[in-house]
Image (cartoon, grey):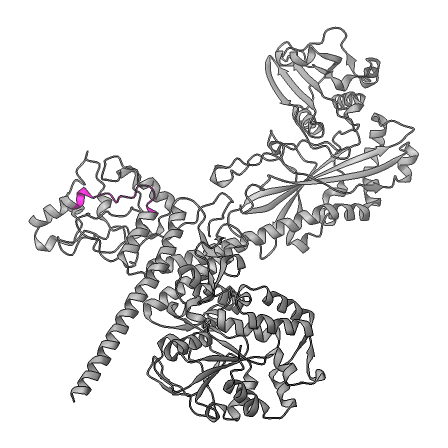
């Protein structure tokens, strides 16, 4: 009973700390928004047109690469002004204030809304979902507050499966161990707790088709306990947050299984080093220790994949590969650089499904086990 | 009219006026009449000085003076203002008329002529019984492309110019655009009457006043005015052909409706147009107060005939057959004018749409700011907003009346508490102290304050109070004592002006009902921000 009391008091303390943290952080968010509004009013009082100053999130000149973090925003970044007196920028100025006021209300009332909810609150005003998405990211960057702390969630598209269980913020217990189905990545990754896993490694899969195939083949349990995650293409923020959280919690090796094409390599770089547009939040989103397991361009030669099973590059592929080769993080990865040179020289790409030309279950029965057993990652 | 004919002939004699070359000079038209002496006639003197008289002999004036009584010798010109031209005049003609001419017409004619001769100084002097009135249209650097000359100071065409916000000086010029020349076939009756050569019309257009320095200033197209000039640069009365503006542009495409407007007496300082049209914006046009602009259309007739100079006779034939000439060229005229006018109308439309976007955006921004301010429970923030909106006089004045009331409240029976202490003084507030009784009322109308009213209310005659004369029915923020923290601000409903307000207890500031922060007012910025409707 003493242990029970100890657990109960610990739980109570945990909830109290969590509540206090919530209050403190909510107050910070409210204060940050109030400061923006106050600056607007000060400009009006001085008879000046108010402006909002934003960092140029997508400008490579504002990015620096650190191999321990990935792509992050430089301290003295270039900014742009969203003016209220210019017809071109006034709509964005107004929408930013509008969304700020909505966030303010949500934080005050401790309610949450998805980006989709915000868009549908006034579709005529916002115009399109991408406008809302961009503005929310701009606000997050401007206030230096993660989006999730602004009480704005996003519908997750990623899946997770394997040896993992956790409790969501609302108390829902989630067990990803069921082999037949995958679990959607939670919307509130920040709020999940009590993560338990005996996985020896984590595998990030680019495509949903490959992910489902591995699930069907019961890959998570066959070789070693593992966790599988897919972002179903370019990963959303929640999937990246979960990968980072699992890395922080378990410190297990993380491997990626991508198509051998420039698009797949770019997706892998997003998981590993982050993206330019979200570089201001790199510390929470990147896992620089990620390894490239497959499908390597050198594997295509090694496995003697038939040339007619490979796909020639398009102009877009060539441009993308050239752009990736110029990025700062490739320079510090000589093995990756070599793989990219092989791909550039052959001007051929392949999807993971090309391994089915060898045998239908080659991927889960031969390729991945051999790669993992004999260290075939770069 | 004889005076009109003589003046036109005189100006035609100075034919270099209408040629492509620029010749600076001065032109004087002086009119003198003495009714008191019983004489009903008047003397008109025309004189020219400067480069524009070069190469013109006095015998050329003989033809100009046909049909009038020329006064030999020294002309009768009483006004000293004409001296500076007369002293230098090489060409001079004085003649007498039985009846004084229409001075208004004369002034308008000269003004209109001066518009297309920016390098010439035009001076009109009217002396009636010794009282002298004169108008001078001095030399200006004009706009002179492709044989066309035009004065571009907008004071000739519009009275007011909007001051660009932020103190920037308004643009004082118009910026014309030249259209392609439109060839006009000479109709057979004109040829038979002796008008040979080639006839063409060169259009030019400009918006007045110019709002380039204030691109976001709300504006609307209010009117279109048309000026027609003959090949010599003399005004030509617009024929009935120009009565209907529908052929000039596809107004509907740009959301405008143009209709003819009856000619009225214009402002004295402005050039009287030959035709005027009103413009309205169709449904969906921007609303709110907007500065009116006028589309100025200048039509310059050009005549080229190697065998015949353009003289008074040619002018007469041309004007007589103008209607027919224009009708026969209507499709070409429509095409030419639309080529010129449509881009300008398109630019106006885009400007209006941009202004609409701006106004809508400002409205959304205003609502968002108000929502945050009204919904905030942070006294730090709300006080910051209040101080900011009060302008440069940041310190909230202490209401001495408040302290008075609190002292009095201690002696006032409990039943009397809660009512404004103003009512305790049957003869009104103590006079001579400059205290405003309205300071004790919660400014229920505070939400209607604009920033400018706050700034007006802020200046203080006494160091700590707001002068009575500057406090209107929308009272300013009732001050609170710095020794007592202000209560949390929550939105209040507007109360009746007579509703008494008092603190719930003596220890509170008399602002027991909270003060809503006024909604911010977006001022016009240096780029001309339209205030939200």
Q: Is residue B64 magenta?
A: no
Horizontally, residue B164 falls left or right of residue B229, namely left
x and y percentages locating residue A164 in the rendered image: 40, 86
The one nearer the camera, B476 or A37, is A37
x and y percentages locating residue B31 in the rendered image: 67, 16
x and y percentages locating residue B351 in the rendered image: 59, 50
| Quadrant the N terminus of chain A occupies | bottom left
- Boundaries of the magenta span: B389-402
Q: How many labels does the image show?
A: 0
Q: Is residue B526 above or below residue A150?
A: above
Q: Is residue B398 magenta?
A: yes
The one nearer the camera, B164 or B286, is B164
In the current view of this chain or complex, which residue is farthest to the front? A374
Q: Is residue B241 at least partly visible in the picture?
A: yes
Q: In this view, does B4 lie above or below B200?
A: above
The quarter of the picture where residue B184 lies is: top right
């Amino acid at each position: 009973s003493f242990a029970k009391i100890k657990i109960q008091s610990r739980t109570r303390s945990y909830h109290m700390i969590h509540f206090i943290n919530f209050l403190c952080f909510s107050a910070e968010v409210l204060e940050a928004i109030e400061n923006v509004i106050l600056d607007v009013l000060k400009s009006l009082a001085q008879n000046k047109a108010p402006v909002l100053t934003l960092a140029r999130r997508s400008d490579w000149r504002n990015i620096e690469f650190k191999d321990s973090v990935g792509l992050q925003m430089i301290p003295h970044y270039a900014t742009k002004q969203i003016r209220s007196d210019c017809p071109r920028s006034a709509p964005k100025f107004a929408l930013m204030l509008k969304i700020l006021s909505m966030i303010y209300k949500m934080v005050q009332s401790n309610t949450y809304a998805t980006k989709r909810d915000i868009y549908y609150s006034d579709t005529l005003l916002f115009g399109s979902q991408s406008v809302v998405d961009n503005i929310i990211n701009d606000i997050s960057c401007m206030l230096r507050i993660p989006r999730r702390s602004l009480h704005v969630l996003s519908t997750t598209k990623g899946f997770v499966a394997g040896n993992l269980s956790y409790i969501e913020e609302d108390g829902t217990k989630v067990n990803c161990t069921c082999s037949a189905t995958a679990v959607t990545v939670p919307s509130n990754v920040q709020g999940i707790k009590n993560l338990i896993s005996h996985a020896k490694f984590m595998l990030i899969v680019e495509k949903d088709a490959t992910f489902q195939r591995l699930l069907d083949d019961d890959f998570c349990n066959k070789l070693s306990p593992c966790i599988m995650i897919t972002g179903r293409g370019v990963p959303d923020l929640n999937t990246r947050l979960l990968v980072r959280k699992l890395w922080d919690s378990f410190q297990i090796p993380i491997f990626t299984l991508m198509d051998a094409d420039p698009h797949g390599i770019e997706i892998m770089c997003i998981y590993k080093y982050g993206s330019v547009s979200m570089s201001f939040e790199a510390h929470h989103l990147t896992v620089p220790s990620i390894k490239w397991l497959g499908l390597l361009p050198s594997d295509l030669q090694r496995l003697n994949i038939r040339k007619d099973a490979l796909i020639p590059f398009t102009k877009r592929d060539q441009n993308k590969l050239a752009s990736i080769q110029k990025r700062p993080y490739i320079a510090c990865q000589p093995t990756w650089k070599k793989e990219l040179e092989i791909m550039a020289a052959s001007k051929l790409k392949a999807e993971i499904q090309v391994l089915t030309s060898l045998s239908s279950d080659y991927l889960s029965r031969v390729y991945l086990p051999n790669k993992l057993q004999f260290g075939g990652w770069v | 009219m004889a005076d009109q004919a003589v003046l036109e002939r005189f100006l035609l004699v100075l034919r270099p006026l209408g040629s492509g070359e620029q010749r600076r000079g001065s032109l004087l038209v002086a009119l003198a009449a003495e009714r008191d002496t019983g004489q009903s006639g008047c003397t008109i003197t025309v004189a020219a000085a400067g480069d524009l008289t070069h190469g013109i002999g006095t015998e050329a004036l003989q033809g100009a003076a046909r049909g009038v009584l020329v006064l030999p010798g020294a002309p009768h010109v009483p006004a000293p203002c004409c001296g500076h031209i007369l002293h230098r005049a090489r060409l001079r003609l004085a003649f007498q008329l039985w009846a004084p001419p229409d001075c208004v017409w004369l002034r308008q004619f000269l003004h209109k002529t001066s518009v297309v001769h920016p390098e010439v100084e035009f001076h009109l002097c009217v002396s009636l019984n010794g009282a002298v009135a004169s108008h001078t249209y001095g030399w200006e650097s004009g706009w002179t492309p492709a044989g066309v000359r035009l004065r571009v100071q907008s004071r000739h065409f519009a009275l007011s110019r909007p001051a660009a916000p932020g103190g920037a000086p308004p643009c004082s010029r118009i910026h014309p655009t030249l259209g392609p020349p439109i060839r006009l076939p000479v109709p057979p009756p004109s040829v038979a009457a002796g008008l040979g050569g080639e006839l063409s019309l060169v259009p030019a257009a400009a918006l007045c006043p110019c709002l380039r320095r204030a691109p976001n200033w709300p504006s609307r197209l209010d009117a279109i005015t048309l000026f027609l000039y003959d090949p010599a640069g003399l005004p030509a009365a617009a024929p009935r052909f120009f009565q209907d503006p529908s052929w000039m542009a596809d107004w509907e495409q740009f959301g405008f409706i143009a209709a003819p407007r009856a000619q009225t007496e214009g402002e004295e300082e402005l050039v009287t147009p030959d035709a005027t049209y009103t413009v309205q914006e169709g449904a969906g046009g921007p609303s709110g107060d907007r500065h009116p602009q006028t589309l100025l259309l200048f039509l310059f007739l050009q005549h080229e005939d190697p065998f015949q100079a353009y003289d008074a006779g040619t002018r007469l034939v041309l004007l007589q057959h103008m209607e027919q000439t224009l009708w026969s060229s209507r499709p070409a005229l429509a095409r030419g004018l639309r080529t010129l006018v449509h881009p300008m109308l398109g630019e106006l439309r885009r400007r209006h749409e941009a202004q609409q976007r701006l106004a809508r955006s400002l409205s959304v921004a205003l609502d968002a700011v108000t929502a945050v301010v009204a919904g905030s429970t942070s006294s730090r923030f709300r006080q910051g907003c209040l101080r900011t909106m009060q302008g440069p006089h940041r310190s909230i004045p202490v209401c001495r009346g408040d302290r008075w009331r609190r002292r009095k409240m201690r002696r006032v029976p409990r039943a009397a508490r809660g009512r404004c202490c103003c009512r305790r003084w049957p003869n009104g507030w103590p006079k001579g102290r400059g205290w405003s009784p309205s300071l004790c009322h919660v400014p229920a109308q505070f939400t209607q304050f604009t920033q400018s009213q706050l700034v007006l209310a802020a200046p203080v005659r006494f160091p700590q109070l707001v002068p009575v004369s500057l406090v209107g029915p929308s009272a300013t923020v009732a001050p609170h004592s710095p020794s007592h923290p202000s209560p949390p601000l929550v939105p209040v409903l507007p109360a009746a002006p007579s509703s008494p307000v008092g603190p719930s207890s003596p220890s509170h500031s008399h602002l027991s009902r909270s003060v809503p922060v006024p909604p911010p007012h977006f001022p016009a910025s240096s780029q001309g921000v339209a205030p939200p409707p």
